[in-house]
Amino acid sequence: MQTPISLKSAERQAFQSTFADGLWDVFIGCFALQFAIAPLLSETLGDFWSSAIFLPFWGLVYLAIWLVRKHVLAPRLGTVSFGKARRAKMRKFSMVMVAVNALVLLVGFLLALNFNQIPGFGIASLFSLLLLASFSLAAWLLDFPRLYVYGLLLFVAPLLGEWLYANLGFSHHGYPVVFGIAAGLIILTGLVNFLRVLSNHPTIDAGEV
């Protein structure tokens, strides 16, 4: 005999299913990719513009995700509207993430002012902790468990990059390598999940005999 599912549990499962298609994984992977490419651009664009140039890139990726959801996934999975509690949680998540990003920018500015006075592993450790805390908080607020794994992956990246820089002479503190690999793994995970959703949920026309 099946146990009845409460409305709250059903909504939670529906909300978690919005992350099953892998598109947010792709977006997160593109975010991580910034830390692999920006150091390579800093010599010509400077530290500020090498990061700011990614803002329109994120906008294009977000637009692509929205279009794919609307025109590719919606015909297969349908759409769902969430209740007030879930929408309030999403607003809370947005406000927390704005505060976290502001803190990251502030810390980055302070580190830039004292860059030569702080050991490389000190900067890498602080960066790692900020990434881990941000992704863990997002995973908790969004009920998105894979973000814990991504947080751990990105936590390791700056520390490993600094080790490669200090011991093996990798350029740019090893960020192009470690963040490039991390971004590739996250994007690949997203693409695999996306293709799995497409194969498991054909359109009505495609499913007709």
Image (tube, grey):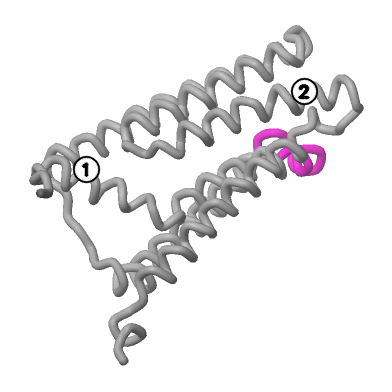
Residue 153, image x, y percentages: 60, 32
Q: Quadrant of residue 5?
A: top left
Q: Confirm whether the magenta stretch covers residue 44.
A: yes
- Decide: is 69 above or below 24: below
The residue beneath circle 1 is: 12
The secondary structure that dominates the magenta segment is: helix
**Residue 15 image offset from top left, x and y in percent:** 26, 47
Residue nearest the viewer, comparing 46 with 90: 90
Which badge, 2 or 1, is on the more N-terminal residue? 1
The residue lying at 76 percent from left, 40 percent from top is: 176
CA gap, disc 2 to disc 1? 40 Å
Q: What residue is at 91 percent from the left and 27 percent from the top?
A: 169
Looking at the rendered image, the quarter that the C terminus falls into is bottom left
Which residue was labeled with disc 2?
Answer: 162
Q: Nearer the viewer, residue 33 or 188?
A: 188
Q: Residues within 10 Å of mark 1 (few under 14, many from 20)?
A: some
* Magenta stretch, residue numbers: 38-48
- The local secondary structure at tag 1 comes to helix
119 relative to 146 in the view: left or right = right
Q: Is residue 89 above or below residue 199?
A: above
Specify the quadrant of the image occupied by residue 89.
top left
Residue at the limit of the structure toward the bottom, as seen here? 209
